[in-house]
Image (tube, helix red, strand yellow):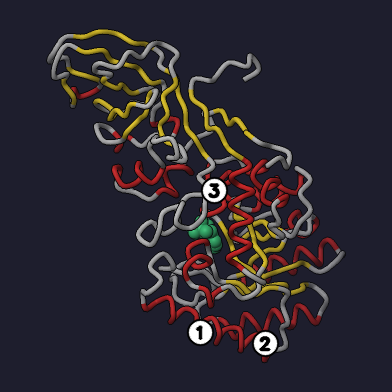
Amino acid sequence: MSTGEQARLEARIDLAAVRSNVRRMREVAGSAQVMAVVKADAYGHGMVQCARAAVEAGATWLGTALPEEALALRAAGLTVPILTWLHVPGDPFADLIAAGVDVSVSGLWALREVTEAVRALGGRPARIQLKADTGLGRNGAPPHDWPLLVEEAVKAQEDGLVTVTGLWSHFACADEPRHPSVAAQLSAFHVALDIAERAGLRPEVRHIANSPATLLVLDSHFDLVRSGLATYGVSPAPDEGSAADFGLHPAMTLVGRLALVKQVEAGSGISYGHTYHTARRTRLGLVPAGYADGIPRAASNRAPVWIDGVRHTIAGRVAMDQFVVDLGDQEAGVGDEVVLFGPGERGEPTAQDWAELVGTIAYEIVTRIGPRVARVYLHAGGNP
Ligand SMILES: *Cc1c(COP(=O)(O)O)cnc(C)c1O
């Protein structure tokens, strides 16, 4: 905010926590490099600022889902290798190639569009990474398509159109490390690597581990690990350990301010649908945060907030722009801070608490926080 005042609703992003989390993931990854995954505005934390902090702390790669995310990182001056992996026909492959972004290829159509773009540009070969579906059942070439994709990529490499910089895959159940699919995917990945290596590919990086695999499946690290949620300090496998157990520090604190405080009588219906009624004469606090900001409507009558050390549950429905808390005996006033979630280190609720109460995962709680919410960056610029 230009006034220096606290915004209606702000996400305070502790970049020192991001740096510390990246250092922690480097420690766990051992000799493997760390890619900070910064897709979806760095899971709601602010893409460029978090990418810079991650690189300062030793992340040597950045990962995005969409081409425009990768191009925005280059436009912001980030020069480290970037991989982008979710493509549709007609994507700006020429721009990606010109920007030196590694493009993931899961099918022949993408290889064709990339090689056509290189021919049209007439310049250097495109950096591509071949993605195998080793059992996630989502993106990536399935085993019966893999040998042909490899063969066509080898030909394109021999023709000087592409350089295959990576071979990679993604886990389905790394947050449940004893799930049988984890070992099955690792062996399928070894098979896919063997096929590619026998065809002559010698990529810079082979990688399959996301945050939970990095922390829990130690033989999955290969040359590079892809750290998404862990970069932001939230546990990617809450059944296996908390953020603190994994040595991570949540980077986002979501803070609003009371917009109105008023007294009402016992039995007053609160917010749309009157799903909450006051049990006695009480004071209500109005919090200017709603589902347009990414606060889940499913948090109605469920999720906690924290005002000056006191926890309250949201009273009634979360509306588009606002919700209400029943302050009871608390002496809170207009303008007071309302912490929705934070690191939890002062007793405030966490994104993980919200996820459990709302019936989702903490990934969704932080990533949904929308563009109407001001981001305020703390500890920028390499200070500890
Ligand atoms: C989002 C994503 C990641 C990061 O996953 P986390 O569990 O957040 O670490 C890694 N790889 C791919 C392909 C992804 O889509």
Quadrant including the N terminus: top right
Viewer-proximal residue, 326 or 321? Answer: 326
Q: Earlier along the polypeptide chain: callout 2 or callout 3?
A: 2
Residue 220: % across, % down: 54, 75
Q: Residue at x 46, y 52 (%)?
A: 244
- Provide the residue designation for mark 3: 232
Q: CA distance from mark 1 to mark 3?
A: 37 Å
Residue 50: % across, % down: 64, 44
Query: In the rendered view, does 280 fall on the left or right side of 122?
Result: left
Query: In the rendered view, does 329 fall on the left or right side of 90?
Result: left
Q: Residue at x 26, y 20 (%)?
A: 326
Residues tagged 1 and 2 counted as in contact (Cβ below 8 A): no
User: Does residue 90 appear in the picture of this structure?
Assistant: no
Amino acid type, residue under disc 1 in the picture: His
Amino acid type, residue under disc 3 in the picture: Tyr
Count neighbours of disc 1 (C-alpha within 10 A) and say few if under 14, some if 14 to 19, many if 20 or more: few
When the figure is inspected, residue 117 is found, relative to residue 14, above or below; the finding is below
When the figure is inspected, residue 191 is found, relative to residue 345, above or below; the finding is below
Q: Earlier along the polypeptide chain: callout 1 or callout 3?
A: 1
- Provide the residue designation for mark 1: 144
Viewer-proximal residue, 378 or 144? Answer: 378
Instruction: Please identify the quarter of the rendering in which residue 332 is found.
Output: top left
Q: Residue at x 58, y 55 (%)?
A: 65
Amino acid type, residue under disc 2 in the picture: Glu
- Provide the residue designation for mark 2: 197
Q: CA distance from mark 1 to mark 2?
A: 17 Å
> Comparing marks 1 and 2, which lies closer to the viewer?
2
Q: CA distance from mark 2 to mark 3?
A: 35 Å
Q: Residue furthest bottom?
A: 198
